[in-house]
Amino acid sequence: MTTAVDVRGVSKTFPGSAGEVHALEGVDLEVREGEFVSLIGPSGCGKSTLMRLIADLDAASGGTIEVFGKSPDRARRDQDYGIAFQQAGLLPWRTVGANIAVPLELHGMPSAERRERVAWLTELVGLTDFTDRYPDQLSGGMQQRVAIARALAERPRLLLMDEPFGALDEMTRERMQSELAGIASETGAAVVFVTHSIPEAVFLSHRVVVMSPRPGRITDVIETGFGADVTRDDALREDPGFFARVTAVREALHGVPAGGGRERR
Ligand code: ADP
Ligand code: MG
């Protein structure tokens, strides 16, 4: 099986007035094709920095990153992945529909097919009635949904999502989680997903990667046991195994060693 994302020994240092900030140090992470991996950890532990490095929005200070065996720069130019980050990053002069259509236009999809795909995507994110509105006529949560639809437009092999559901109300959020899980499993896309929500991470992921700050590094990796064959629905949210994994991730975040015992930093 091919590797979607391969991060090896990556470090990232930012200059700062009070000395260098070690945003990342010694980070190793391999995401397989079709695998859903969440990154979780306190603010400032380098989650966004790691995502930006993978997405070629910044360069690592050390180590190597490959996306489908290519440099991040090459993968970006080949449009190998879709991005939905905290800031929706919509084009203000384009309507909702026209924003979602951007990647499709770039790839030269014929207009009839494009209209069909845009209609499906706007319905998916519950914005059919807003297709002709402009971003400044939408709430933050709605803008975020447009960004998600745009990221999914091309059914990319890899999705990079940095707290994409942070601005959504709980009902919409749970619906988007199920839809995202469905889309990822249908299209076989790998997903790297940043969240602050432990249940969200467990619900969506095959693996949850726990990070800690100063310097930002990976401290734990928890297999959820919920693979691609597991349907992400309400039954899973109420499954005792689900709660057990939520507890495991919480303890990892709080530095409690698995099975109790000695305190770990
Ligand atoms: P997270 O997304 O986990 O909250 P970030 O990746 O945003 O964390 O930040 C990790 C650390 O790197 C923080 O200490 C942050 O202040 C610092 N940092 C991030 N981006 C920059 C930047 N462009 N310049 C200086 N410091 C930065
Ligand atoms: Mg962040």
Image: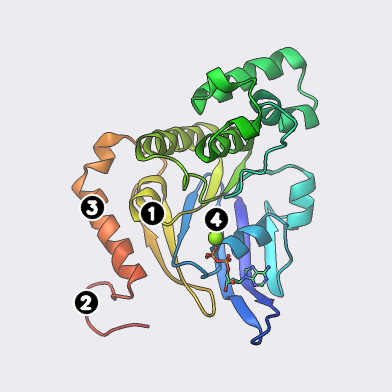
As measured in the structure, the alpha-carbon distance from the residue carrying label 2 to the one carrying label 1 is: 23 Å
Q: CA distance from mark 2 to mark 3?
A: 18 Å
- Front-most of 33 and 237? 237
Disc with the residue nearer the chain's start (3 vs 1):
1
Disc 2 marks which amino acid?
Answer: Gly
Q: How far separated are the C-alphas under marks 3 and 4?
A: 24 Å
In the picture provided, is 238 more to the left or to the right than 2?
A: left
In the rendered structure, which amino acid carries the disc numbered 1? Answer: Ser
Numbered mark located on residue 197 in the image: 1
The earlier-in-sequence mark between 4 and 2 is: 4
Q: Quadrant of residue 264?
A: bottom left
Q: Which mark is residue 243?
A: 3
Using the numbered discs, state the Cα–Cα distance from disc 1 to disc 4 in whole angstroms: 20 Å
Q: Residues within 10 Å of mark 3 (few under 14, many from 20)?
A: some
Q: Is residue 155 above or below residue 204?
A: above
Residue found 60% across the figure and 53% down from its top: 3
4 and 2 marks in contact (CB < 8 Å): no
Image mark for residue 31: 4
Q: Nearer the viewer, mark 3 or mark 1?
A: 1
Q: In the image, what residue occupies the spot 60% across and 38% down? A: 147
- Tell me which corner region of the image, top left, top right, bottom left or bottom right, holds residue 28: bottom right
